Image (spheres, helix red, strand yellow):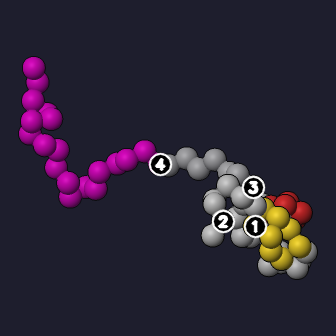
Amino acid sequence: MQSSNEPLSHACPRCSADVEQRFYGPCPNCVDQLRTALAGERTDVVAPEYEPKMNVTPNAVALKDD
């Protein structure tokens, strides 16, 4: 049995190229192609400010004046 630090020899599941890497998976070239093809654009989402429903009444303790 191999230790986890030794590279594995296997065929890339995507392009069938022989590679040696620590974990089973696509080769570095395929990883770069997938990241380029599947990368999405980041968008900033602004959550609307919380407004309680009209049927909700404020807590009496929260309304208490000090």
Front residue (pair 49, 35): 35
The magenta-colored residue range is: 48-66
The residue singled out by tag 4 in the image is: 48
State how far apart marks 3 and 1 are (Cα): 34 Å
Select label 4 or label 1 by which is in front.
1
- Is 2 situated left or right of 9 in this image? left
Q: Secondary structure at mark 1?
A: strand
Q: Residues within 10 Å of mark 2 (few under 14, many from 20)?
A: few
Front residue (pair 64, 30): 30
The residue singled out by tag 3 in the image is: 41
Is residue 38 visible in the rendered structure shown here?
Answer: no
State how far apart marks 4 and 1 are (Cα): 49 Å
Query: Which image quadrant is residue 1 in?
Result: bottom right
State how far apart marks 2 and 4 are (Cα): 53 Å
Which of pointers 2 and 4 lies earlier in the amino acid sequence? 2
Q: Residues within 10 Å of mark 4 (few under 14, many from 20)?
A: few
Which of pointers 3 and 1 lies earlier in the amino acid sequence? 1
- Looking at the rendered structure, the kind of residue marked 4 is Pro
Q: Secondary structure at mark 3?
A: loop
- Looking at the rendered structure, the kind of residue marked 3 is Glu
The residue singled out by tag 2 in the image is: 2
Q: Identify the residue shown where x is 16% and y is 49%.
A: 57
**Residue 63 within the magenta-colored segment of the rendering:** yes
Circle number at residue 8: 1
- Is 15 situated left or right of 40 in this image? right
x, y percentage for residue 60? 8, 39
Q: Identify the residue shown where x is 10% and y is 20%.
A: 66
Select label 1 or label 2 by which is in front.
2
